[in-house]
Amino acid sequence: MSGYLLSLLGIVLIDLVLSGDNAVIIGMAVRGLPRPLREQAILVGTLGAVGLRVTFTILAALLLTVPYLRAAGGLLLFWIAAKLLRPEAAGGGGRGANGFWSAVGLIILADFTLSLDNILAVAAASGGDLGLLVIGLLVSIPVLMLGANLVAALLDRLPWLLLLGALVIVWAGARLLVHDPWVHTLLAPSLWQAMAFGLVLVAVFLRGDLRGLKRAIGRT
């Protein structure tokens, strides 16, 4: 029994530690929605993300053998960072990330990407026990939702924190690039090099929206 509880505690701690990036993305995705819709989007997106995480953990051995999968996930996170910085998302107006379902989709898509680098740790802690894995994830849901609500509330008060949130997302994407075994074999990039590459890509994705972004985050 004590071994079971220790394994469960390990899974919960891992999920909480690895949920920081997720909470930032969720908070950024829903920040422009009215409060009732914001809470619904966080709930639906989080539940969908947890379901994906369980599935990916079961398929961990298979997924992590796919060439350049982590690298593709890193590039996807760079795109998500740019999308969440666009003026129509940063400006609020009741739309959030272009609406309720768009916000939910971004939450699930981001968690799919972030889970690529996390599933082995969770799978190892669960020892192959699916029930233990599911319980651990369910316990971590309230904390993830609380963190996302806190991020969204902070962004309402301090819109310039969007830039810090985007930097966190780019850092997560850079980590995926660096940890991709095929990219490491070919280029062996450092984390800082991958970060610089990600920031350049975000700027390219934003293109002419930089002025609009500056106006959006300057609103109080």
Image (cartoon, grey):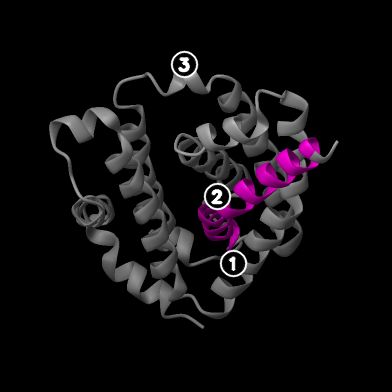
| Residue closest to the eye, 89 or 195 | 195
Circle 2 residue: 18
Where in the figure is residue 90, as x and y percent of width and height? 46, 65
| Residue closest to the eye, 91 or 11 | 11
Check disc 2 and give the amino acid type: Leu
Q: Nearer the viewer, mark 1 or mark 3?
A: 3
Check disc 1 and give the amino acid type: Val
- Rounded to the nearest whole Å, what is the CA distance between mark 3 and mark 2? 21 Å
Residues in magenta? 3-31
- Rounded to the nearest whole Å, what is the CA distance between mark 2 and mark 1? 16 Å
Q: Badge 2: few (under 14), some or many (20 or more) residues near its Cα, within 10 Å?
A: some
Taking the view exactly as shown, the residue that stands out farthest to the right is 1
Q: Residue at x 48, y 75 (%)?
A: 159
- Which labelled disc corresponds to residue 62? 3
Dot 3 or dot 2: first in sequence order is 2
Q: Residue at x 60, y 21 (%)?
A: 58
Where in the figure is residue 21, as x and y percent of width and height? 50, 54
Taking the view exactly as shown, the residue that stands out farthest to the top is 62
Quarter in which the N terminus is drawn: top right
> 57 above or below 35?
above
Dot 2 or dot 1: first in sequence order is 2
Where in the figure is residue 198, as x and y percent of width and height? 26, 51
- Which labelled disc corresponds to residue 91? none
> 157 above or below 137?
below
Mark 3–mark 2 contact, CB under 8 Å? no
- Which labelled disc corresponds to residue 151? 1
- SS for tag 1? helix
- SS for tag 2? helix
Check disc 3 and give the amino acid type: Leu
Q: Give the overall secondary structure of the magenta segment.
A: helix
